[in-house]
Image: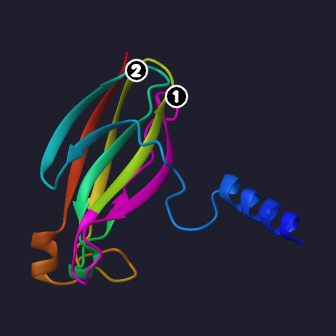
């Protein structure tokens, strides 16, 4: 019986069950923010992440506006990491990509602040607080 339990625990540990994110390797992390354009230069196969500060408790909700040119870079996942763990504490959202072939593409992330299900700012304050972070990606 102990052998079965030990084997089962080992399988769970290897499978990655429990807390944590789906992607543990963010690669090169590039920070951006609303209202900025950041230039990113990577090599084919050099994983990278676009990082934006967030705080869902106040209404931040980042999303990928459009998938980049898939010949240049492919989207892997969106990951969230909180800071502090207490109520109202912010964190970072990471959009993880795999560069594929030399070329350029633009990646736009949108922070819809206190938007509803339709992802459209409903009030004047929501329109003022919402915005895009733009990343100009070059794969060399």
Segment colored magenta: 63-91
**Alpha carbon of mark 1 to alpha carbon of mark 2: how far?**
8 Å
Identity of the residue drawn at 20% across and 80% down: 58
Q: Exactly how many numbered labels are in the figure? A: 2
Image quarter where the C terminus lies is: top left
Residue 92, image quadrant: bottom left
Check the image and report above or below for 9 versus 74: below
Q: Nearer the viewer, residue 50 or 135?
A: 50
Picture coordinates of residue 36, whole percent (x, y): 13, 46
Which one is nearer the viewer's eye here, 85 or 35? 85
Q: Does the magenta portion include 69?
A: yes
Q: From the top left corner, tell me how far across and down residue 83 is, in percent.
A: 26, 66
> Tag on residue 1?
none
Return the x and y of residue 127 as percentages of the image width and height.
15, 73
Residue linked to disc 1: 71
Of the image marks 1 and 2, the number of the one nearer the N terminus: 1
Say if mark 1 contacts mark 2, CB within 8 Å: yes
Residue 37 against residue 137 in the figure, above or below = below
Crowding at label 1, few (<14), some or many (≥20) Cα neighbours within 10 Å? few
Residue extending furthest toward the right: 1
* Placement of 114 over or under 96, stated as above or below: below
Kindly identify the residue that appears in the image at 25 percent across and 54 percent down. 52
At 64% from the left and 64% from the top, the residue drawn is: 17
Q: Residue 120, image x and y in percent?
A: 29, 75
The residue carrying mark 2 is 103
């Amino acid at each position: 019986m102990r052998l079965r339990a030990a084997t089962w625990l080992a399988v769970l540990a290897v499978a990655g069950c429990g807390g944590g994110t789906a992607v543990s390797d963010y690669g090169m992390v590039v920070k951006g923010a609303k209202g900025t354009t950041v230039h990113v230069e990577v090599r084919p196969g050099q994983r990278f992440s676009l990082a934006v500060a967030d705080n869902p408790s106040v209404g931040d909700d980042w999303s990928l506006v459009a998938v980049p040119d898939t010949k240049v870079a492919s989207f892997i996942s969106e990951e969230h990491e909180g800071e502090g763990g207490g109520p109202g504490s912010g964190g970072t959202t990471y959009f993880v990509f795999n560069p594929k072939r030399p070329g350029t593409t633009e990646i736009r992330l949108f922070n819809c602040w206190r938007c509803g299900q339709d992802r459209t700012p409903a009030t004047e304050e929501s329109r003022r607080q919402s915005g895009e972070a733009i990343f100009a990606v070059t794969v060399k």
